[in-house]
Amino acid sequence: MRLIQSIGEWFEARLQLAPAIRDTVEHPVPRATASWFYVFGSAALTVFGMQIVTGILLALVYAPTAGEAWNSLQTLNHAIPMGWYIRALHGWGSNFMVAIVLLHMVQVFLFGAYKYPRELTWIVGVFLLLMTLGMAFSGQVLRFDQDAFWGIGIGASISSRVPVIGPWAVHLLLGGPIIAGATLSRFFALHVFVIPGLLIALVGLHLLMVLKLGINEWPMPGRIVRKSTYEKQYHELVKTDGIPFVPGAVYKDIFFSACILLALGLVAAYFGPFGPSGRPDPTIIQTAPRPDYFFLWIYALLSLLPPEMETPALLIGPVVAILALLALPFVFGEGEKSWRRRPIAVVSVLLIAVALGTFTNLATYTPWSPVMNAWSADPVPPAFLEHRTALERQGALVFQLKQCHNCHSLGQEGGKRGPALDNIAVIQTEDQMIRQVIQGGGNMPAYGRNLSPPEVTALVAFLKTLHPSSQAPAAVAADKAISQNAPPAASGGKP
Amino acid sequence: MTMPESLSRRAMLMKVGLFLNGLVAIGLAVPIVRYLLSPLLRIRKQSYTQWLTLGDIAQYPAGETRFATFRNPDVTPWDGKTADSACWVRRIDQQKFQVFAINCAHLGCPVRWFPQSGLFMCPCHGGVYYQDGSRASGPPERGLFEYPYRVEEGKLLIKAGELPTPGSPTALVKFDGRFPCA
């Protein structure tokens, strides 16, 4: 014991760090902030530390070249003891990190912590969020598989739409005219040196400001932030009702961080590493690239925006969003902090969460994508073929062979790009069907050039059988309306 | 007699030192910036605007659309499989072809050809194109990208050294002064 103490004293005599460390760990915090709501920042830091450790471990084996990266991941997964587990920890750590950073941001927003004098802390936090997302994307690229390869292509296509400098931006992003060796090398440099370096520096700044300005006090409804009085009130609060950070508040941080690490370890062990999916071979096109979880909502958005809206939304949307986040502490730097008195803030968070959740959910089953193998995989269900004439069955074959099934479902089988056709005969008359098949429209290709007249006749004969047995097809209703010399009410249009 | 601080040797050397540092910084910045911008400088322009062969035209039957692969003109030994690219070759008649980039004009995913319905379909966001490459439906704002081609000594040649993107659809064509679709 005495030996340890004397060694400690030897170092302290030279470093003289003890007072500074003591001041830091014992800095007073308002008693109410020793709360379970205040643990997300430290948890994000813990997971970041974990990412650094597992990242370095992976770098011991990973080969950052386009030719060998995929092979080295296979080696990690299958040949190196626990290599799969380190990959799983790093991949899931990325998901955990994004999730915790978002939770931290929501908490800080709802508790009004971005208000005076912590504007800069918030702004640095916004950049930390962007860099976290940058790490998530560049990390996905380093998992150099088919998803990564085509994912970079999507990034390049988006960048190319920037006016004037777009094509140059693409070449800078790719390191050349195509996605190849130079592309992976520069994403490696970004993921391993550039962004982590900036992250570490900004995390340091972020923490320094938390220490210098003090942690945001628990917001009380009616306690208004004023620039002229805030600092005095805060110091008063800390003096009258403050506790030292260690041990007063830190135990909850430590406990929560341990829970997060435990959860990460278990999730990584149970679910294993992400991919890699197929080899990044541009000549293998039997692939349906998907982004990683946290970019799925963008994937959905890009599918659902009308074509003419897309470029403006892609280029202006992120700029507006980031500027809004940066402007927030300046526009709303004073006033109520408590979320109980900020209904618009609460509704905004809920709205964004619901929107992101909905888009993410949609992207997990991609109703907008044709099911590329539906025509060769799922046959038309037998129920649709019973008691049908030869011509109608021929139509079912046309439906299958001409890939209609890739976009239209029958009995829940097939694509969801177009409407399900189970009851199409109730909705459209024979003439409407023929016109729709031949001319297309409403986001359907025109089949006029690719279907012979007998094929159209057979197909429409089959489509006319698609109605519930209790309900007459639309054609009959229309005929009836015409015969009664009345406007064709029941003939309907497109749904 | 005392001199004002601003005229002292110390202040003088400080200014000269800062000036020299600035000079060196600029001197170093030039090569660094040039290095960083090297993908833009197109010093290898010749190598990636050259004609690439897609093989004998006999392997592309008239009236059909076939899958073809080629090696990029500008490769490094560590590119691995990414040194290769793919495209769709549509032979209209004896001498007329259309060579489509594999990349969807929306966001670059690989489109697949379905000869039965005569459509290209994209698995990502649902873009669909007709056999002549024109847009049929979905989010793309335009038809498929086309590579410039020519037929020489029974071989089909294309220019395809650059990833086509919506902002730069076959930028290479600009060097020829002609557009393939025009």
Image: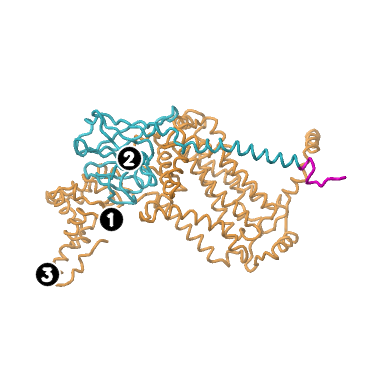
On screen, residue B100 above or below A234: above
Which residue in the structure is indicated by mark 2?
B101
Q: Position of residue B120 (x, y in %)?
A: 28, 44
Mark 2 to mark 1 CA distance (whole Å): 30 Å
Q: Which residues are magenta?
A: B1-11
Foreground mark, 3 or 2, reads: 2
Question: Under tag 2, what secondary structure?
Answer: strand
Question: Under tag 3, what secondary structure?
Answer: helix
Q: Describe residue B12's horizontal placement relative to residue A224 as left or right.
A: right
Asked if disc 3 and disc 1 are in contact, CB closer than 8 Å, the reply is no
Q: Position of residue A389 (x, y in %)?
A: 12, 51
Q: Residue furthest front?
A: B1
Subunit ID for the residue under disc 3: A
> What shade does chain A have?
orange
Q: Position of residue A76 (x, y in %)?
A: 49, 31
Residue drawn at (29%, 48%) of the image: B128
The chain letter of the cyan chain reads B
Q: Which mark is residue A419?
A: 1
Question: What amino acid is at disc 1?
Answer: Pro
- Out of A465 and A283, give the one closest to the viewer: A283
Which residue in the structure is indicated by mark 3?
A483
For residue A179, what is the image quadrant? top left
Asked if disc 3 and disc 2 are in contact, CB closer than 8 Å, the reply is no
- Out of B26 and A179, give the one closest to the viewer: B26
Subunit ID for the residue under disc 1: A
Q: Describe residue A165's horizontal placement relative to residue B150 as left or right.
A: right
